Image: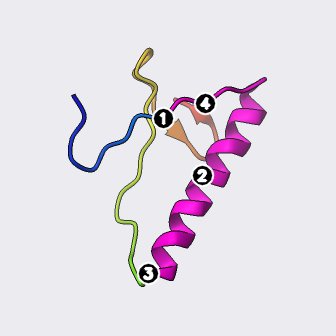
Amino acid sequence: MLGDNEYRLTFSYRDDADLKEQIDALFDEIYTAAEIRNCVVDDMSLTDDATGLGWDHTDGWR
């Protein structure tokens, strides 16, 4: 079950580079939307439900 501030997203991608590009674009959009509304993103993480791995901006899944 997801918490109040959690979202489940599905990505379709060709390879890790394609996935990284999509995630980077998503994070950029989130930060931009917050900035336009004079808000701050305090915490944002991405976890693969199947593996439990988290997304690292530099290294991908860890």
SS of the residue at dot 3?
loop
| Disc 4/disc 3 C-alpha distance (Å) | 27 Å
Q: Main secondary structure of the magenta part?
A: helix
Q: Amino acid at mark 2?
A: Leu
| Disc 1/disc 4 C-alpha distance (Å) | 7 Å
Q: Tell which of 29 and 48 is nearer to you.
A: 29
The tag earlier along the polypeptide, 4 or 3, is: 4
Q: Any mark on residue 26, and which?
A: 2
Asked if disc 1 and disc 3 are in contact, CB closer than 8 Å, the reply is no
> Crowdedness of circle 3 by 10 Å Cα count: few (<14), some, many (20+)?
few
Q: Residue at x 40, y 66 (%)?
A: 41
The tag earlier along the polypeptide, 4 or 2, is: 4
Asked if disc 1 and disc 4 are in contact, CB closer than 8 Å, the reply is yes
| Disc 4/disc 2 C-alpha distance (Å) | 11 Å
> Crowdedness of circle 2 by 10 Å Cα count: few (<14), some, many (20+)?
few
**62 relative to 21 in the view: left or right:** left
SS of the residue at dot 2?
helix
Q: Amino acid at mark 3?
A: Arg
* x and y, in percent, of residue 8 in the image: 40, 34
Asked if disc 4 and disc 3 are in contact, CB closer than 8 Å, the reply is no
Residue range in magenta is 9-37
The tag earlier along the polypeptide, 1 or 2, is: 1
Q: Any mark on residue 37, and which?
A: 3
Q: Residue at x 27, y 50 (%)?
A: 5
